Image (tube, grey):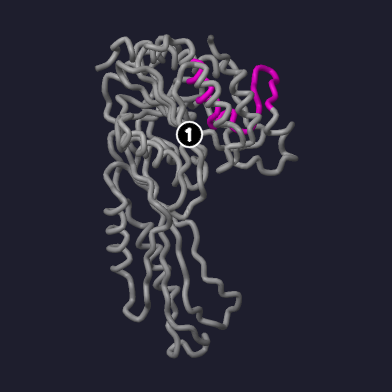
Amino acid sequence: MAIDPQALLERLIACPSVTPQEAGALDLLERELSASGFAVTRLRFEGDNSYPVDNLFATRGKTGRRLLFAGHTDVVPPGDRAHWTSDPFIPRVAEGRLYGRGAADMKSGIAAFIAACSALPQDAGIIQLAITNDEEADAINGTDKLVGWMVENGHGFDFAIVGEPSSTEIVGDSIKIGRRGSFSGKLTVTGTQGHVAYPHKANNPLPVLAAMATALSSERLDAGTEHFPASNLEITTIDVGNPVSNVIPMSGTLRFNIRYNDLWTPETLGDWVRERIGAVAANQTQVLFEVSGVPSRAFLSPLGADIETLSAVIAARTGKAPDYSTGGGTSDARFIAQYGPVVECGLVGPSMHKADEHIALEDLHSLTAIYTDFMRAFFAGGAK
């Protein structure tokens, strides 16, 4: 029986699945997928200095090409509910739009894909879903471990779609074929505290810190590549914690973030930073460079027949082939790209993470149709 994507999306929005609480969202998906002939496995990962996370893997079909759909049921907190027109976890339809937290990011993508699956015969091919409830926060015990578990247990794939919002103005006008990486760092420069009237008895770390800020931000990392813009470093804060003007501080810190393209890796960026700060570090100061968190690696999916098939399907629906984009922040596609080709194809997302998050219902049905048409072409041998 065909699944109505709007009805499924409304029920998903009603699950207040703020990371990492799945709040019944995965239970709902398990019931829907089981009724559609999927074998469902629930997986809980924990450890690595992060909270436990519930995940879901589902598979249907025994032979044929293998298509993976990935997404997340977790949502960001709604924030001050006074800014919402109505309860963020009670779906509301008004003037052709569906409102609620997660409507755009990205419960709509999940609802559209599952609805599309219900329109295909169960023996069309091998369809797999990897759904996590930890994308919006740490992303440690979610897709990374889930896809690793899949591959270890023989669930490889030929092509993957992540249902994140990828369109800019109309559904299908853009798909993401890669993402920039993200590398964050912290510099701490330590000198000797003292009275400003006796500078010879102290060692002010701030001129060195300022010189490092200049060294990091004054030289361009690269000029970009065919599919990526130039890598960019932004200094995000310089902190001293000195409330008075007559004390030379002991130390100061600087934080920065680099959004980088496929010319770099976290390792080569670390070397670049060390070289830049080493050129200005004074012998009488101590400099500590730390990488903050786990860097996100840049990736670019190989352009091939499956991406061409998806583009042709979108063009047939919209009248125009999609742009290939690598813009925006990071996504869970970076974990999937380690094992096979992946693109992001989803709705228009300007309202995501905002109060009164919403989508156009017409867009939801258009995305469902795109997924349906693509799966038919994919399993019919539209790509090899």
Q: Check residue 150 for magenta coloring.
A: no
Q: Which residue is mark 1?
A: 42
Q: Which residues are magenta?
A: 91-116
- Residue placed at 46% from the left, 37% from the top? 43
Residue 205 lies in quadrant: bottom left
Query: Does residue 337 appear left or right of residue 107 in this picture?
Result: left
Q: Nearer the viewer, residue 208 or 102?
A: 102
- Residue placed at 50% from the left, 78% from the top? 249
Q: Is residue 236 above or below residue 59?
A: below
Question: How far across and how far down the image is residue 20, in percent?
Answer: 55, 43
Q: Residues within 10 Å of mark 1 (few under 14, many from 20)?
A: few
Question: How far across and how far down the image is residue 346, in percent?
Answer: 47, 25
Q: Split into 4 quadrants, where in the image is the C terminus?
A: top left
Residue 78 lies in quadrant: top right
Question: How far across and how far down the image is residue 274, in percent?
Answer: 30, 63
- Residue placed at 29% from the left, 48% from the top? 265
Tag 1: amino acid: Arg
Residue 343 visible: yes
